[in-house]
Amino acid sequence: MSDQTETDRDEREAFEAELLERREAALAHVVKFGDPVLKSAASPVSNFGPELRAEVERMIAIMRDGMGVGLAATQLGVLRRLLVFQAGSDGEPTAVINPQIEWSSDELSLAEEGCLSLPRVSMDVERPLHVRVSGRDVEGEAIEIEASGLEARVLQHEMDHLDGILILDRTTREQRKAALRALREGGSYSPSPEEHELVDEGELREPRTEA
Ligand code: ZN
Protein backbone atom coordinates (compact mmCIF):
# COMPACT_ATOMS: atom_id res chain seq x y z
CA MET A 1 0.00 0.00 0.00
CA SER A 2 1.39 3.43 -0.94
CA ASP A 3 1.84 6.13 1.67
CA GLN A 4 -0.77 8.20 -0.12
CA THR A 5 -3.37 5.44 0.09
CA GLU A 6 -2.57 4.98 3.73
CA THR A 7 -2.94 8.68 4.43
CA ASP A 8 -6.28 8.72 2.58
CA ARG A 9 -7.48 5.80 4.62
CA ASP A 10 -6.39 7.37 7.90
CA GLU A 11 -8.15 10.60 6.98
CA ARG A 12 -11.31 8.78 6.01
CA GLU A 13 -11.28 6.82 9.26
CA ALA A 14 -10.75 9.99 11.28
CA PHE A 15 -13.62 11.66 9.40
CA GLU A 16 -15.93 8.69 10.00
CA ALA A 17 -15.01 8.61 13.68
CA GLU A 18 -15.85 12.29 13.96
CA LEU A 19 -19.23 11.78 12.27
CA LEU A 20 -20.00 8.92 14.63
CA GLU A 21 -19.05 11.02 17.64
CA ARG A 22 -21.23 13.89 16.42
CA ARG A 23 -24.08 11.46 15.84
CA GLU A 24 -23.86 10.11 19.38
CA ALA A 25 -23.79 13.63 20.82
CA ALA A 26 -26.91 14.52 18.78
CA LEU A 27 -28.75 11.35 19.74
CA ALA A 28 -28.10 12.07 23.42
CA HIS A 29 -30.67 14.89 23.07
CA VAL A 30 -33.35 12.51 21.76
CA VAL A 31 -35.87 11.12 24.26
CA LYS A 32 -35.79 7.33 24.26
CA PHE A 33 -38.31 4.53 24.76
CA GLY A 34 -39.73 4.42 28.29
CA ASP A 35 -40.08 8.18 28.67
CA PRO A 36 -43.81 9.00 29.02
CA VAL A 37 -43.39 12.12 26.89
CA LEU A 38 -43.31 9.85 23.82
CA LYS A 39 -46.91 8.84 24.56
CA SER A 40 -48.15 12.40 25.04
CA ALA A 41 -50.04 14.54 22.55
CA ALA A 42 -48.36 17.85 21.70
CA SER A 43 -50.11 21.25 21.75
CA PRO A 44 -50.45 23.59 18.78
CA VAL A 45 -47.83 26.30 18.34
CA SER A 46 -49.32 29.78 18.61
CA ASN A 47 -46.24 32.00 18.91
CA PHE A 48 -44.17 32.52 15.79
CA GLY A 49 -40.97 34.40 16.51
CA PRO A 50 -37.28 34.15 17.33
CA GLU A 51 -37.80 31.46 19.94
CA LEU A 52 -39.53 29.19 17.44
CA ARG A 53 -36.86 29.88 14.82
CA ALA A 54 -34.15 28.89 17.31
CA GLU A 55 -36.03 25.70 18.17
CA VAL A 56 -36.36 24.77 14.48
CA GLU A 57 -32.63 25.38 13.94
CA ARG A 58 -31.79 23.20 16.93
CA MET A 59 -34.04 20.41 15.62
CA ILE A 60 -32.52 20.56 12.12
CA ALA A 61 -29.00 20.38 13.58
CA ILE A 62 -29.89 17.35 15.72
CA MET A 63 -31.60 15.65 12.77
CA ARG A 64 -28.58 16.29 10.53
CA ASP A 65 -25.93 15.24 13.06
CA GLY A 66 -28.08 12.29 14.12
CA MET A 67 -28.29 11.25 10.45
CA GLY A 68 -32.05 11.06 10.72
CA VAL A 69 -34.51 11.97 7.99
CA GLY A 70 -37.06 13.47 10.36
CA LEU A 71 -37.54 14.64 13.93
CA ALA A 72 -40.59 15.68 15.95
CA ALA A 73 -40.35 18.21 18.81
CA THR A 74 -41.79 15.51 21.08
CA GLN A 75 -38.54 13.57 20.64
CA LEU A 76 -36.67 16.43 22.32
CA GLY A 77 -39.19 16.47 25.16
CA VAL A 78 -40.93 19.56 23.76
CA LEU A 79 -44.69 18.96 23.49
CA ARG A 80 -45.38 21.35 20.65
CA ARG A 81 -46.75 20.49 17.21
CA LEU A 82 -43.59 20.99 15.25
CA LEU A 83 -41.55 18.67 13.02
CA VAL A 84 -38.58 18.81 10.67
CA PHE A 85 -37.80 16.42 7.85
CA GLN A 86 -35.34 15.90 5.05
CA ALA A 87 -36.18 13.04 2.74
CA GLY A 88 -33.30 12.37 0.37
CA SER A 89 -29.79 13.73 0.68
CA ASP A 90 -30.43 16.48 -1.89
CA GLY A 91 -33.58 17.71 -0.13
CA GLU A 92 -33.63 20.89 1.93
CA PRO A 93 -34.48 20.41 5.60
CA THR A 94 -38.06 21.59 6.02
CA ALA A 95 -39.99 22.55 9.16
CA VAL A 96 -43.75 22.09 9.43
CA ILE A 97 -45.61 23.69 12.29
CA ASN A 98 -49.10 22.51 13.32
CA PRO A 99 -49.13 19.91 10.50
CA GLN A 100 -52.38 18.33 9.42
CA ILE A 101 -53.15 15.55 6.96
CA GLU A 102 -55.54 17.01 4.39
CA TRP A 103 -55.71 13.91 2.24
CA SER A 104 -54.14 10.47 2.12
CA SER A 105 -54.25 7.86 -0.64
CA ASP A 106 -56.13 4.58 -0.41
CA GLU A 107 -53.01 3.03 -1.86
CA LEU A 108 -50.80 1.74 0.94
CA SER A 109 -47.11 0.97 1.15
CA LEU A 110 -45.33 -1.45 3.47
CA ALA A 111 -41.79 -0.65 4.59
CA GLU A 112 -39.45 -1.25 7.49
CA GLU A 113 -39.10 1.78 9.78
CA GLY A 114 -36.76 2.65 12.59
CA CYS A 115 -37.03 5.53 15.05
CA LEU A 116 -34.37 7.62 16.77
CA SER A 117 -36.35 7.16 20.01
CA LEU A 118 -36.34 3.36 19.71
CA PRO A 119 -32.67 2.40 19.51
CA ARG A 120 -31.66 -0.71 17.58
CA VAL A 121 -35.12 -1.87 16.60
CA SER A 122 -37.07 -1.61 13.37
CA MET A 123 -40.39 -3.00 12.23
CA ASP A 124 -42.72 -3.18 9.26
CA VAL A 125 -45.26 -0.37 9.05
CA GLU A 126 -48.01 0.05 6.47
CA ARG A 127 -49.00 3.61 5.59
CA PRO A 128 -50.72 5.53 2.79
CA LEU A 129 -48.30 5.96 -0.12
CA HIS A 130 -49.32 9.57 -0.86
CA VAL A 131 -50.38 12.36 1.48
CA ARG A 132 -51.17 16.05 1.33
CA VAL A 133 -50.16 17.90 4.49
CA SER A 134 -51.00 21.47 5.43
CA GLY A 135 -49.38 23.54 8.14
CA ARG A 136 -47.30 26.65 8.68
CA ASP A 137 -43.67 27.41 8.01
CA VAL A 138 -41.37 28.90 10.62
CA GLU A 139 -42.54 32.44 9.72
CA GLY A 140 -46.17 31.42 10.23
CA GLU A 141 -47.06 31.35 6.54
CA ALA A 142 -49.52 28.67 5.43
CA ILE A 143 -47.86 25.83 3.49
CA GLU A 144 -49.05 22.70 1.76
CA ILE A 145 -46.88 19.68 0.95
CA GLU A 146 -47.69 16.91 -1.52
CA ALA A 147 -45.56 13.93 -0.62
CA SER A 148 -45.11 10.37 -1.87
CA GLY A 149 -43.03 7.37 -0.92
CA LEU A 150 -40.30 7.94 1.64
CA GLU A 151 -41.19 11.61 2.12
CA ALA A 152 -44.85 10.75 2.80
CA ARG A 153 -43.73 8.04 5.21
CA VAL A 154 -41.44 10.39 7.15
CA LEU A 155 -44.16 13.04 7.46
CA GLN A 156 -46.66 10.49 8.78
CA HIS A 157 -44.09 9.02 11.18
CA GLU A 158 -43.31 12.48 12.63
CA MET A 159 -46.97 13.51 12.81
CA ASP A 160 -47.63 10.29 14.73
CA HIS A 161 -45.04 11.43 17.30
CA LEU A 162 -47.05 14.64 17.82
CA ASP A 163 -50.03 12.46 18.76
CA GLY A 164 -48.00 10.20 21.05
CA ILE A 165 -48.06 7.31 18.55
CA LEU A 166 -44.98 5.17 17.91
CA ILE A 167 -44.20 2.62 15.19
CA LEU A 168 -44.78 0.01 17.92
CA ASP A 169 -48.47 0.98 17.68
CA ARG A 170 -48.46 0.62 13.88
CA THR A 171 -46.93 -2.80 13.35
CA THR A 172 -48.11 -6.39 13.78
CA ARG A 173 -48.61 -7.89 17.24
CA GLU A 174 -45.71 -10.26 16.70
CA GLN A 175 -43.25 -7.55 15.68
CA ARG A 176 -44.43 -5.26 18.47
CA LYS A 177 -43.85 -8.02 21.00
CA ALA A 178 -40.39 -8.83 19.68
CA ALA A 179 -39.38 -5.15 19.49
CA LEU A 180 -40.63 -4.45 23.03
CA ARG A 181 -38.63 -7.37 24.35
CA ALA A 182 -35.49 -6.09 22.62
CA LEU A 183 -36.06 -2.56 23.95
CA ARG A 184 -36.53 -3.79 27.53
CA GLU A 185 -33.50 -6.06 27.37
CA GLY A 186 -31.28 -3.61 25.52
CA GLY A 187 -31.07 -5.95 22.53
CA SER A 188 -31.89 -5.38 18.90
CA TYR A 189 -34.72 -6.46 16.60
CA SER A 190 -35.43 -6.36 12.92
CA PRO A 191 -38.01 -8.39 10.99
CA SER A 192 -35.28 -9.05 8.41
CA PRO A 193 -32.35 -10.33 10.51
CA GLU A 194 -30.08 -10.76 7.50
CA GLU A 195 -29.82 -6.97 7.39
CA HIS A 196 -29.30 -6.56 11.09
CA GLU A 197 -26.01 -4.76 10.63
CA LEU A 198 -27.79 -1.97 8.78
CA VAL A 199 -30.44 -1.17 11.36
CA ASP A 200 -28.68 1.61 13.20
CA GLU A 201 -28.64 4.12 10.41
CA GLY A 202 -31.21 6.75 11.07
CA GLU A 203 -34.84 7.45 11.68
CA LEU A 204 -36.12 5.45 8.76
CA ARG A 205 -34.84 2.98 6.24
CA GLU A 206 -35.51 3.04 2.53
CA PRO A 207 -38.75 1.24 1.76
CA ARG A 208 -38.08 -2.44 1.30
CA THR A 209 -41.30 -3.19 -0.53
CA GLU A 210 -43.93 -0.98 -2.00
CA ALA A 211 -47.34 -2.44 -2.70
ZN1 ZN B 1 -39.52 8.40 15.39
Image (cartoon, rainbow, N blue to C red):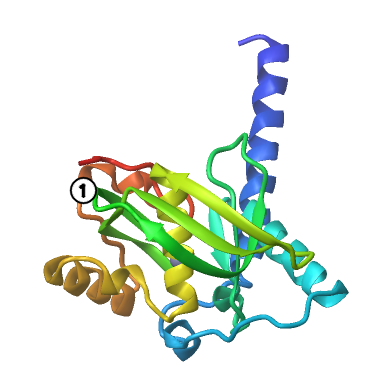
Q: Is residue 63 above or below residue 87?
A: below
> Hey, which residue is sitting farthest right in the picture?
50
Residue 117 visible in the current orientation? no
The quadrant holding residue 23 is: bottom right
Counting from the top left corner in percent of width and height, residue 74 is at 55, 78
Q: Which quadrant does the N terminus fall into? A: top right
In the rendered view, tell whether residue 197 sits above or below residue 188: above
What's the amino acid at mark 1? Ser
116 or 147: nearer the viewer: 147
Residue 71 position, x and y percent, is 56, 63
Please state the horizontal and vertical placement of residue 67, each as a whole percent of the image: 58, 50
Q: Is mark 1 within 8 Å of ligand 1?
A: no
Q: What residue is shown with label 1?
A: 192
- Quick check: which quadrant has ligand 1? bottom left
Identified at 87% across, 73% down, the residue is 50
Residue at x 69%, y 38% (from the top left corner): 15
Residue 34 location, x and y as percent? 41, 85
Question: Is residue 50 shown left or right of residue 35?
Answer: right
Q: Indicate whether 5 appears above or below 130.
A: above
Q: Residue at x 26, y 61 (%)?
A: 189
Left/right placement of residue 14 relative to residue 39 reads: right
Instruction: Mark yes or no: residue 51 visible.
Output: yes
Q: Decide which of 53, 194 is in the foreground and name it.
A: 53
> Is residue 210 placed above or below 62 in the rendered structure?
above
Residue occupying image coordinates x 66% and y 30%: 12
Quadrant into which the C terminus falls: top left
